[in-house]
Amino acid sequence: MDWHIINHRDYIDGPFETFQDALNEALVLGNDTRTAPRIGRKARDFYIYRPPYDRKEQWQAEYWICTKPAALGQGIAEVLFDPQSKAA
């Protein structure tokens, strides 16, 4: 199963073979050093990771860690998964 990291506007990274692989990458992207990262489950195969507050950025957007079918089931636009849209 392919896992992806997206947010409400952009495709971030993927595909990853496992949820744990995708989560590990999200933790790196979020510069997370917490022992218990904030992860919530929105639906089957769709998790929301909230990175820690970043003093430089003031905030960081949520990362959505999900499979493509789960994202489409939640109303996420399929265009986010289109490789052509990543180049824009």
Image (cartoon, grey):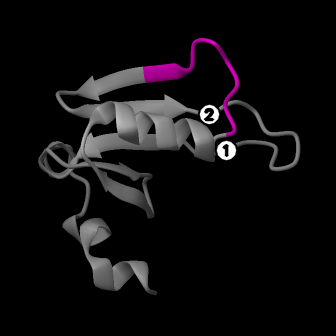
Mark 1 secondary-structure assignment: loop
In the rendered image, which residue does mark 1 sit on? 60
Q: Residue at left 60%, top 47%? A: 29
Q: What percent of the width, then of the height, locates residue 12?
A: 46, 59
The single residue placed furthest to the top in the displayed view is: 36
Residue 74 falls in image quadrant: top left
Q: Is residue 50 left or right of residue 33?
A: left
Task: Please identify the dominant SS of the magenta region.
Answer: loop
Q: Residue at left 60%, top 41%? A: 28
Above or below, 42 against 86 in this view is: above
Tally of numbered tags: 2
Q: Which mark is residue 7?
A: none
**Circle 1 residues within 10 Å: few <14, some 14–19, many ≥20:** some
The single residue placed furthest to the right in the displayed view is: 56
Q: Is residue 27 left or right of residue 52?
A: left
Which contiguous range is marked in magenta? 31-39
Quick check: is 58 in the magenta stretch?
Answer: no
Residue 14 falls in image quadrant: bottom left
* 64, 16: nearer the viewer: 16
* 8, 37: nearer the viewer: 37
Q: Are marks 2 and 1 in contact (CB under 8 Å)?
A: yes
Q: Residue at left 56%, top 20%? A: 37
Labels 2 and 1: the sequence-earlier one: 2
Q: What percent of the width, then of the height, locates residue 21?
A: 37, 38
Q: Which mark is residue 51?
A: 2
Mark 2 secondary-structure assignment: loop
Q: Amino acid at mark 1?
A: Gln
**Circle 2 residues within 10 Å: few <14, some 14–19, many ≥20:** many
Q: Residue at left 17%, top 27%? A: 44
Q: Is residue 6 left or right of residue 30?
A: left
Cα distance between the residues tagged 2 and 1 = 6 Å
Q: What percent of the width, then of the height, locates residue 78?
A: 20, 66
